[in-house]
């Protein structure tokens, strides 16, 4: 084989390989899109309702009251270890 024939075979091989990769990636993109549509159709996201503002505020104050002694103890422990 001459150099020109080898170059032509190399270019043919390169183009066919790039073509196969392109086709594979296009099929992969199509399959991912199809799977996404199927999952969204058969397993939709649950609709969450917004909690009332009064209930959310009382929960925050309950959490703060519950954590207050723990925070005070942690600060006292830190000050004791630092010698303050």
Image: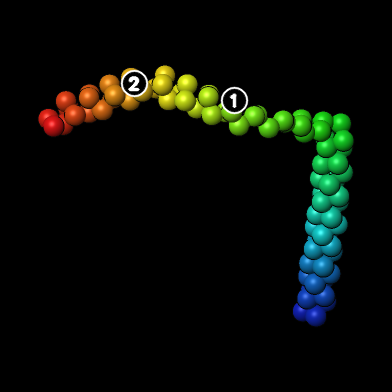
The picture quadrant where one finds residue 12 is: bottom right
- Label 2 crowding class (10 Å Cα cut-off): few <14, some 14-19, many 20+? few
Residue that sits furthest to the left in the current view: 83
The disc label shown at residue 70, or none: 2
Q: Give coordinates of residue 4: x percent, y percent.
A: 80, 80
The picture quadrant where one finds residue 31 is: top right
How many numbered dots are placed on residues in this image? 2
Quadrant location of the C terminus in the rendered image: top left
The disc label shown at residue 47, or none: none
**Dot 1: element:** helix
Which of the two residues, 80 or 35, is positioned nearer the viewer here? 80
48 left or right of 82 in image: right
The disc label shown at residue 55, or none: 1
User: Reading the chain from its start, which is encountered first: label 2 or label 1?
Assistant: 1
67 left or right of 45 in image: left
Instruction: State whether residue 16 is above or below residue 1.
Output: above
Q: Give coordinates of residue 32: x percent, y percent.
A: 81, 45
Instruction: State whether residue 32 is above or below residue 50.
Output: below
């Amino acid at each position: 084989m001459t150099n020109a024939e080898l170059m032509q075979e190399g270019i043919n091989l390169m183009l066919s390989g790039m073509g196969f990769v392109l086709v594979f990636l296009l099929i992969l993109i199509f399959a991912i899109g199809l799977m996404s549509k199927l999952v969204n159709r058969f397993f939709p996201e649950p609709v969450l309702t917004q909690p009332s503002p009064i209930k959310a505020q009382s929960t925050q104050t309950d959490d703060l009251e519950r954590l207050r002694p723990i925070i005070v103890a942690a600060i006292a422990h830190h000050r004791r270890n630092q010698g303050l």
